[in-house]
């Protein structure tokens, strides 16, 4: 059983209240930071911890913090990215609704480290009920002197507000999020300037994922070096994995980075195997935008080594035989899954969510969806398969924000590893379009 | 909407006005436009589950921005309904993880039971069906969101019936965002 740094007390009754949370050691990191540490010392601990952004990009959090510009007399902001929208990912919703004070505590400690006096939690609009939970917890934190003026007599002031989005995946991209927070359409900004220099209201801003900010709490409490002792190599600490799809026990698991993928899928401590006694066909390991891998390659690397739940092990082999840890949205698909249909569903998602300002993404995601739709519905041609690869390649790297890549990668990977399924849809349209039909390598056709 | 007389200019209720005043304190005075999305949520809840052009004009006037600044935002974000809707808007997640656990079947079932097609409203005016993308509840798929509540694990006819019955029995008006619904929000 791995150590739990974030979710140890998640099932304690009343842990969403200030009183119970405090009784279980809550807000210690605020006391420690404000009373005994300088802001730079807090940043230093986060650097030492090796914490990498938990929203998906995996960029070192401490380094991101150190980029923050600090011009004299200009307010700075910390904005929490709680716009969790990556298909397959639902950890932040869980964390915020069960442990609202953990995020608030992390926001206070992190805001202190960055010298921010007004911070925001940007939460996706669909989660208005979680916004109410957070607002209630924030009111408790104010009432107990952990927010507001002169927190704990330290002279440090902080106001914290929750801000709802309106339903747009693109607002998970940090500059789109800032546009949205300013009351505009969520069109990502050209970079540079990066938010660290010109972010919210053109002021220096750090945007961090919910889980990253929550992780600052144990890092400050126990020290960055202690945190870095957990995990493997450059994948330090624990990670929340959102497990879904065809698993016996879907849900949120806080794992110590380094758990073998096979153990994560099959052991009773985690997902308990594939449902209905079926075989595993494929896994999307880090949210819908990372490359899909067939069973053989998700369990073992191309070199035959056990694949581990770490940033490095999952990306071993690059995009030829590897994938990414991403946001930790772990989608398992059993042997009856139609890969073409699933890929079409993801492409429809990215087409729907493209903000439309870059033509390669606006037009390209539309083409991907359209071509996949006709393949899935029995009207495809053999050359459509290469057309998908070609369109994906033309989107990649040609857009302002990474939504283009997010749309291109899953399609390219599906064709790379499951070309035979796409071909089967072309050669056997009648079978392929029968409801519930799927391709199995064991029998050419199965329903 | 049958009336041909000029519509009465909508007004926010006192409760909504108080909430709006509180929201304005969250942003710098010269950046009040930041309150646009929160205000659109309030407006949609106050005025029957959708934001008419008149309601959007009211939002613009309340913030002190041009109406076009509201229109371009309300049309960008999927949560704002720009046409009248039924009493309950059922937002059915259709993305991959929900599809793997039966969202296609769920949609078909809801269309059959309510008599509404996706994008439309049931003849009795009770239910509008809307397909949406990932709602971040993939571990309890398939799911439907109705206002501020998530209905999860809707993979049995019983679970679907329970949801629809609960909604049918909600006789009062749709709740405003800041009011306690008294219903459990989520199974997680």
Image (cartoon, rainbow, N blue to C red):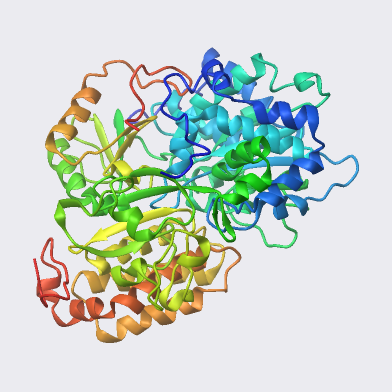
Q: Residue at x 10, y 75 (%)?
A: A443
- Is residue A76 among the parts visible in the rendering? no
The answer to whether residue A5 is left or right of residue A151 is: left
Q: Residue furthest bottom?
A: A383
Q: Nearer the viewer, residue A334 or A394?
A: A334
- A258 displayed left or right of A294: right
Q: Position of residue A341 (x, y in %)?
A: 25, 65
Q: In the image shown, does B81 or A280 lie closer to the viewer?
A: A280
Residue A111, position as x, y percentages in the image: 72, 36
> Looking at the image, which is closer to me, A27 or A257?
A257
Please determine whether, in this image, residue A76 is positioned above or below residue A369: above
Q: Residue at x 42, y 82 (%)?
A: A390
The quadrant of the image that shows the N terminus of chain A is top left
Q: Is residue A163 visible?
A: yes
Instruction: Report the residue at 29% width, 63% height from top.
Output: A342
| Residue A215 at x, y percent in the picture | 59, 41
Q: Which of the image's four quarters has the C terminus of chain A?
A: bottom left
Q: Residue at x 49, y 58 (%)?
A: A326
Q: Picture quarter containing residue A138?
A: top right
Whether A312 is drawn above or below B85: the answer is below
């Amino acid at each position: 059983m791995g150590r739990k740094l974030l979710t140890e007390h998640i099932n304690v009754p009343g842990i969403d209240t200030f009183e119970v949370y405090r009784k279980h050691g809550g807000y210690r990191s605020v006391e420690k930071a404000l009373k005994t540490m300088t802001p730079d010392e807090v940043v230093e601990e986060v650097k030492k911890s090796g914490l990498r952004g938990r929203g998906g990009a995996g960029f070192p959090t401490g380094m991101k913090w150190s980029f923050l510009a600090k011009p004299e007399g200009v307010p700075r902001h910390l904005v929490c990215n709680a716009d969790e929208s990556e298909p397959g990912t639902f950890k932040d919703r869980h964390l915020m609704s069960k442990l609202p004070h953990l995020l608030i505590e992390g926001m206070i400690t992190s805001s202190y480290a960055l010298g921010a006096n007004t911070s925001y939690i940007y939460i996706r609009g669909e989660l208005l009920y979680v916004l109410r939970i957070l607002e209630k917890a924030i009111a408790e934190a104010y009432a107990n002197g952990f927010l507001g003026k002169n927190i704990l007599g330290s002279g440090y002031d902080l106001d914290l507000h929750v801000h709802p989005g309106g339903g747009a995946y693109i607002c998970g991209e940090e500059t789109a999020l800032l546009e949205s927070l300013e009351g505009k359409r969520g069109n990502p900004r050209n970079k540079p300037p990066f938010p660290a220099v010109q972010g919210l209201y053109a002021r220096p801003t750090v945007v961090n994922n919910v889980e990253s900010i929550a992780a600052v709490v144990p890092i400050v409490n126990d020290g960055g070096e202690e945190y870095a002792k957990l995990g493997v190599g450059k994948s330090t600490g624990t990670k929340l994995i959102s497990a879904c799809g065809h698993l016996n026990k879907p849900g949120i698991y806080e794992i110590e980075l380094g758990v073998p993928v096979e153990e994560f899928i099959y052991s009773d401590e985690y997902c308990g195997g594939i449902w209905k006694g079926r075989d595993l066909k494929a896994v999307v390991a880090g949210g819908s935008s990372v490359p899909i891998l067939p069973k053989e390659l998700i369990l073992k690397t191309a070199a035959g080594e056990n694949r581990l739940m770490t940033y490095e092990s999952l990306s071993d082999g690059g995009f030829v035989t590897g994938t990414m840890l991403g946001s930790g949205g772990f989608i398992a698909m059993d042997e009856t899954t139609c890969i073409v249909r699933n890929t079409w569903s993801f492409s429809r998602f990215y087409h729907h969510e493209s903000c439309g300002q870059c033509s390669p993404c606006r037009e390209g995601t539309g083409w991907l969806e359209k071509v996949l739709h006709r393949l899935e519905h029995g009207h495809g041609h053999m050359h459509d398969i290469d057309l998908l690869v070609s369109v994906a390649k033309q989107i990649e790297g040609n857009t302002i924000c990474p939504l283009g890549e997010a749309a291109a990668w899953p399609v390219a990977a599906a064709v790379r590893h499951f070309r035979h399924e796409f071909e089967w849809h072309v050669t056997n349209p009648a079978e392929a379009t029968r409801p519930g039909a799927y391709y199995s390598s064991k029998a050419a056709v199965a329903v | 909407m049958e009336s041909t007389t000029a519509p009465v200019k909508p007004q926010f209720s006192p409760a909504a006005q108080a909430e709006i005043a509180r929201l304005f304190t969250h942003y710098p005075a010269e950046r009040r436009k930041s309150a646009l999305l929160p205000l659109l949520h309030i407006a949609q809840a106050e005025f029957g589950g959708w934001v008419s052009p008149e309601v959007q004009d009211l939002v613009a006037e309340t913030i002190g921005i041009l109406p076009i600044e509201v229109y371009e935002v309300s049309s960008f974000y999927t949560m704002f309904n720009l046409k009248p809707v039924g009493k309950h808007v059922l937002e059915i997640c259709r993305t991959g993880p929900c599809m793997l656990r039966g969202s296609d079947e769920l949609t078909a079932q809801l269309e059959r039971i309510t008599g509404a097609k996706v994008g439309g409203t049931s003849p009795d005016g009770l239910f509008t069906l809307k397909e949406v993308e990932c709602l971040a509840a993939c571990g309890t798929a398939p799911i439907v969101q109705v206002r501020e509540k998530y209905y999860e694990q809707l993979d049995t006819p019983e679970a679907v019936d329970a949801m629809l019955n609960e909604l049918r029995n909600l006789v009062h008006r749709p709740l405003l965002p800041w009011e306690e619904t008294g219903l459990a929000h989520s199974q997680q």
